[in-house]
Image: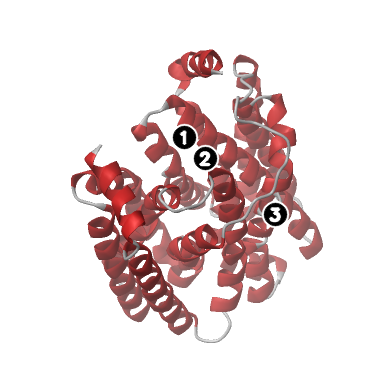
């Protein structure tokens, strides 16, 4: 087994960009839709509720990943990531010609499944490289994908054209011939679940999921906000883990939660772009801490993936529920509640002596 891991590591040394590319492009196909809510309402005459259902439905598809990943992963984990990107590009092309709600609902659902496969494979490849920078940049693919969506939005200004333009990523599958590595950790499907990990990702990803509604909330100002905020957020994915090694998980997480809560509340009260940038940067940066927190709980490693995948349901619920009634009020209340609950939950965990000891050992090493 040790020899196999060395072989895999050596094969991927020359191509560490693969997981970053896969996570970023998969996020682009998932979230480019967020920039065109108003356009879709006006051109296809969908209601805002229907449009936000289409925006969030891929996160329901994402929940299918734990049940199919082990089967599809047998073609090779890097190959799975690149193949998923190609399939997403083809579906995106078809979406550019779809006009009925049910058609788009099915397409977006399938994109959610492929997103789950691509990003899960990307994270596994990143972990094989054993590079903290690559892992951080791979997680930062969420911000890079959003940034691509904003750029395509600014250049093409039409959801149909952006969907069709996604065809440029179809050649990704051609590069999979060089990457047919089967993960030594891959095994038959076995479902495990941890309520603790589920709560951690449910609360920790709340800022990221609330950001789904920001492009339509800001309107014409969304391009400026997205370019600045998500460019800075890429570095936050590296900054917070670095702060953890310099200080501690507790001293890194607590101030971050406070900053997210205050900046998020003030942003939805004022629509100030600077506050949106701070909320985006730190809110997404927290995502880089969630796997670290999960690994330090009394939870078997096999339970982390499925628990994280099922927490994605809030990615569907939040954009639908928050836009019913007063969007800004709903959003700021949700941010406040989620960050307070996360703070309290982690305070309880930090109060556990054995847990605190494990954190201390990791920081010292």
Q: Distance between the residues labelled 1 and 2?
A: 5 Å
Q: Residue at point 33% right, 48% down?
A: 358
Q: Can residue 354 be seen in this view?
A: yes
Packing grade of label 2 (10 A; few <14, some 14-19, many >=20) is many
Packing grade of label 3 (10 A; few <14, some 14-19, many >=20) is many
Q: Do callouts 1 and 2 mark residues in contact (Cβ within 8 Å)?
A: yes
Q: Residue 61 carries which label?
A: 3
Q: Distance between the residues labelled 3 and 2?
A: 16 Å
Q: Is residue 275 visible?
A: no
Task: Tell me the element at label 3.
Answer: helix
Q: Distance between the residues labelled 1 and 3?
A: 22 Å
From the viewer's perspective, is 109 left or right of 327? right
Task: Tell me the element at label 2.
Answer: helix
Q: Residue at point 73% right, 41% down?
A: 189
Residue 260 placement: quadrant: bottom left
Q: Residue at point 35% right, 34% down?
A: 132
Of the pair 302 and 335, the residue shown nearer to us:
302
Q: Residue at point 68% right, 33% down?
A: 187
What residue is shown with label 2? Answer: 23
Of the pair 235 and 222, the residue shown nearer to us:
235
What residue is shown with label 1? Answer: 20
Return the x and y of residue 279 as percentages of the image width and height.
Answer: 33, 64
Return the x and y of residue 252 as percentages of the image width and height.
Answer: 25, 56
Task: Tell me the element at label 1.
Answer: helix
Q: In which quarter of the image is the C terminus?
A: top left
Return the x and y of residue 56 as percentages of the image width and height.
Answer: 62, 63
Is residue 229 depicted above or below 239 in this figure?
below
From the viewer's perspective, is 262 left or right of 156? left
Is residue 180 depicted above or below 286 in this figure?
above
Q: Do callouts 3 and 2 mark residues in contact (Cβ within 8 Å)?
A: no
């Amino acid at each position: 087994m040790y020899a196999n891991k060395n072989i895999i590591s050596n094969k991927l040394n020359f191509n560490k960009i693969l997981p970053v590319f896969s996570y970023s492009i998969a996020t682009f196909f998932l979230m480019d839709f967020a920039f065109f809510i108003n356009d879709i309402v006006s051109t296809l005459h969908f209601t805002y509720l229907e449009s936000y259902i289409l925006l969030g439905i891929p996160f329901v598809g994402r929940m299918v990943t734990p049940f199919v990943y082990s089967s599809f992963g047998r073609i090779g984990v890097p190959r799975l990531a690149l193949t998923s990107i190609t399939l997403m590009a083809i579906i995106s092309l078809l979406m550019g010609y779809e006009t009925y709600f049910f058609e788009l609902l099915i397409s977006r659902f399938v994109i959610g499944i492929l997103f789950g496969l691509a990003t899960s494979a990307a994270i596994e490849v990143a972990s094989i490289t054993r590079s903290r920078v690559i892992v951080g940049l791979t997680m930062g693919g969420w911000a890079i994908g959003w940034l691509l969506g904003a750029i395509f939005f600014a250049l093409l200004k039409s959801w149909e054209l952006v969907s069709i333009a996604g065809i440029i990523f179809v050649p990704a599958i051609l590069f999979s011939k060089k990457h047919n590595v089967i993960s030594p950790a891959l095994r038959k499907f076995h479902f495990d679940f941890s309520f603790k990990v589920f709560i951690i990702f449910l609360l920790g990803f709340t800022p990221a999921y609330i950001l789904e509604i920001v492009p339509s909330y800001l309107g014409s100002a969304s391009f400026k906000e997205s370019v600045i905020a998500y460019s800075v957020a890429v570095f936050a994915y590296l900054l917070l883990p670095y702060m953890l090694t310099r200080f501690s998980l507790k001293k890194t997480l607590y101030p971050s939660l406070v900053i997210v809560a205050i900046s998020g509340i003030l942003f939805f009260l004022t629509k100030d772009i600077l506050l949106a940038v701070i909320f985006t940067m730190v809110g997404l940066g927290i995502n880089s801490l969630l796997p670290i927190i999960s690994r330090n709980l009394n939870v078997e490693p096999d339970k982390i993936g499925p628990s994280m995948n099922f927490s994605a349901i809030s990615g569907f619920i939040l954009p639908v529920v928050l836009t019913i009634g007063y969007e800004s009020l709903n959003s700021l209340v949700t941010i406040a509640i989620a960050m307070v609950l996360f703070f309290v939950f982690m305070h309880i965990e930090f109060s556990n002596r054995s847990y605190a000891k494990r954190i201390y050992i990791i920081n010292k090493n």
